[in-house]
Amino acid sequence: GAVVSQHPSRVICKSGTSVKIECRSLDFQATTMFWYRQFPKQSLMLMATSNEGSKATYEQGVEKDKFLINHASLTLSTLTVTSAHPEDSSFYICSATAVLEDYEQYFGPGTRLTVT
Amino acid sequence: EDQVTQSPEALRLQEGESSSLNCSYTVSGLRGLFWYRQDPGKGPEFLFTLYSAGEEKEKERLKATLTKKESFLHITAPKPEDSATYLCAVLSTGNQFYFGTGTSLTVIP
């Protein structure tokens, strides 16, 4: 099956700093990538959808200036949490689809962000 | 309003006790319905895609079925290693994904 990786798997940062999370599709070209946030024992909350080479589409309530998304190539998308605060601590998961007609999203293993 | 509802929220089964998880959906048009398994602290793992009513798919002890309003994930003779949260998601004809809140399954030896 399609493999998606995320890096880092865990990160601890101080309040006010920025953190970048990478999402890579390892064995396929991802035309669309998604970024989710998940709180403990809750379902996935879609933050934004990004297509290669174009600006990300953010869900209502998600600050685009705080959560910067770049989808520079067909195999890489990055999420940068700027000026992180403790309330940004969460589990961030990316997913990718090869071609939208294929429909399936393949998820990365997630990144646990802790802001102290 | 498009939405996906999963039930029950949590399910405890004895090893070998078969059961079903439900995913009800209301969307303007269905392109696909997906089942995922998620273990704690990990990303969801893809299980099945169903595209049209009447379709069924199987994988080991799991079988997914689809009607025009809901999908069932049947678990036959579950084992402790089947313990996980099972997520259902729907892709609408408007290319929007909707996720359910999941069913947390615990299989007791």
Image: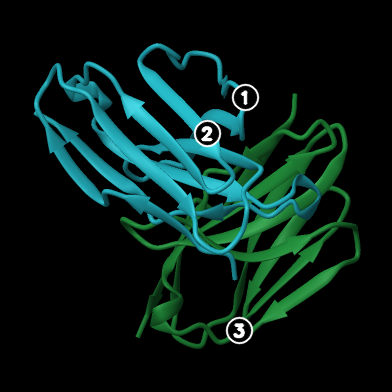
Please state the chain letter of the residue tagged with numbered disc 3 in the rendered image: B
Q: Are marks 2 and 1 in contact (CB under 8 Å)?
A: yes
Q: Residue at x 83, y 46 (%)?
A: B31
Q: Is residue B81 above or below residue A26?
A: below
Chain B, colour shown? green
Q: Position of residue A70 (x, y in %)?
A: 47, 29
Q: Residue at x 69, y 34 (%)?
A: B3
Please state the chain letter of the residue tagged with numbered disc 1 in the rendered image: A
In the drawing, what numbered circle is on residue B61?
3
The residues tagged by marks 2 and 1 sit, at their Cα atoms, a distance apart of 7 Å
Where residue B26 sits, quadrant-wise, is top right
Report the residue marked by disc 2: A71
Please state the chain letter of the residue tagged with numbered disc 2 in the rendered image: A
Please count the marks in the image. 3
Three-letter code for the amino acid on which mark 3 is drawn: Arg
Report the residue marked by disc 1: A54
